[in-house]
Structure formats: structure tokens, C-alpha cells
Image: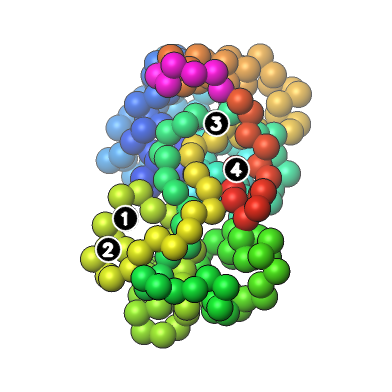
Amino acid sequence: MLTVALCKGRMLQSTLALLPTVGFTPAEDVIDSRKLIIEDAARPDVRYLLVKPVDVPAFVEHGAADVGLVGKDILYEAEADLHELLDLRSGVCRMVIAGFAGTNLRTVRRVATKYPRVAREFFGVRSQQIEIIDISGSVELAPLVGLSDCIVDLVETGRTLSENGLVILAEAGTISTRLVANRRSYQLKAAAIDELSDGLRRATEADSGAHDDTATGTVRQGAVS
């Protein structure tokens, strides 16, 4: 049995569109179903777990799932012991530092974010000590009420920032969906995992017209890569 952890939320739609192209198809409408475990439509040896994005690394690292599809932002913060196989180049967003126009990043001391590791790395390479304020909801509110000097957050279109009078001050990297595997599963179920990984790689290359490189998962000059 190959168990695949899928992220609920914004990445799910693009993931579900990609899986059938490589022969993996959930048996039910994952978007509308309330089930948390769903079988494959044609393959009795495959099942899917519907998991909150932040929990995918834990499910895969501890073997509850053999592989998972999750955003690089979540992986980077989790620092889980996983085998990162592939950048799917889907669900692409920018990790940015945002605040009021004219904010001098050199004078920033308080940063609100859901991504404390990214924030510390970004300002750390600039030899700045900052106070991290953990926010799980609308991060954009923090500078508006004086809670922080700026925020570190994911941006797709930038509309929310604009409507709240904030601008992008700097970028810390590009985030996309990654395929990760449990290290033991990658040894014991290599054929099944390679089938999924190779299929997704071919689909990704066909879609982008470019060769895929395995992500390093490092931070260089404060940028997630």
C-alpha cells in the first residue's frame, strides 16, 4: 500500500489536476468529500490522506504517509527529516517582506509572520536581531495597528497587501509544491514511489518545457530555495 498525503487548501486543486495524468486518481471528489482517507479509483494499492498543510511533514516523517505533496514554505519551517524528491512548479507564490511604503528594512525590529524561520534567516544574514511575533491569521493587520514594523508572508497576487495600504519591500524566495518521501518508505517502496515521482517529473517538464532540478532546501542570502 502506497499512502499519499495531500494538502487541504489552496494547493489541492492543482494537485488533483496533475495526479490523474500520471495514473493516480482518487475514487471520490476530494474537494467536496468529508472523508479523510480516500482510496484510488483503479489501484487497490494506493490511498490518499487529506491533511492540513502544516501537518503533512509530520505524517510523512513518521511514516503515516509514504509520500506527500506540500508547499516549500511548510517544509522549510518544519525542518522535518524527509527525502525531497521533486519540485512540481505548481502552486507558485512569493515569500515577501511587506510593510508601509518607505519602511527602512535596516531599522526593522518587530516582524509579524507565520514563518519565523524564514524571517530569522532573512534578517539574520543582514546581521539584524528581530523580535518575531507569531501570527496565525491575517498577518497584514499587524503593521496596521502598530504590532509590527513589517510582515513576512506568502503573496500570490498582492491584492490583500494593496487593499490594506501595504507594499512589498523585499522578496525572500519563491515557493512551490514539492513531492517528499519518508526515508524508510523510499527504500522499501522504491518502485511505487519512483513511478509517482517519475510520472510527475515528466508531467512537470512537459508543462514547463524545462528540465527539473531537485530542490536544495537551503537559504542563501535570506532566500528560500
Residue drawn at point x = 40 percent, y = 78 percent: 143
- Kind of residue indicated by mark 1: Gly
Q: Are marks 2 and 1 in contact (CB under 8 Å)?
A: yes
Taking the image as shown, residue 103 lies to the left or right of residue 144, namely right
Q: CA distance from mark 3 to mark 1?
A: 23 Å
Task: Name the image quarter holding residue 34.
Answer: top left
Q: Are marks 1 and 4 in contact (CB under 8 Å)?
A: no
Q: Which residue carries the number 3 mark?
A: 87
Q: CA distance from mark 1 to mark 4?
A: 20 Å
- 82 in relation to 201, above or below: below
Q: CA distance from mark 2 to mark 3?
A: 29 Å
Q: Nearer the viewer, mark 3 or mark 4?
A: 4
**Element type at mark 4:** loop
- Kind of residue indicated by mark 4: Ser
Q: Which residue carries the number 4 mark?
A: 225
**Element type at mark 2:** helix
Q: Residue extending furthest left? A: 163
The disc, 1 or 4, on the residue closer to the chain's N-terminal end is 1
Q: CA distance from mark 2 to mark 1?
A: 6 Å
The disc, 2 or 3, on the residue closer to the chain's N-terminal end is 3
Measured from the top left, where is residue 45 in percent x and y?
55, 19
Q: Which residue carries the number 1 mark?
A: 158
**Element type at mark 1:** loop
Q: Any magenta on residue 108?
A: no
Residue drawn at point x = 66 percent, y = 42 percent: 217
Label 3 neighbourhood size at 10 Å, few (<14), some (14-19), many (20+)? many
Measured from the top left, where is residue 53 in percent x and y?
49, 49
**Nearer to us in this view, 49 or 129:** 129
Q: Which residues are magenta?
A: 207-212
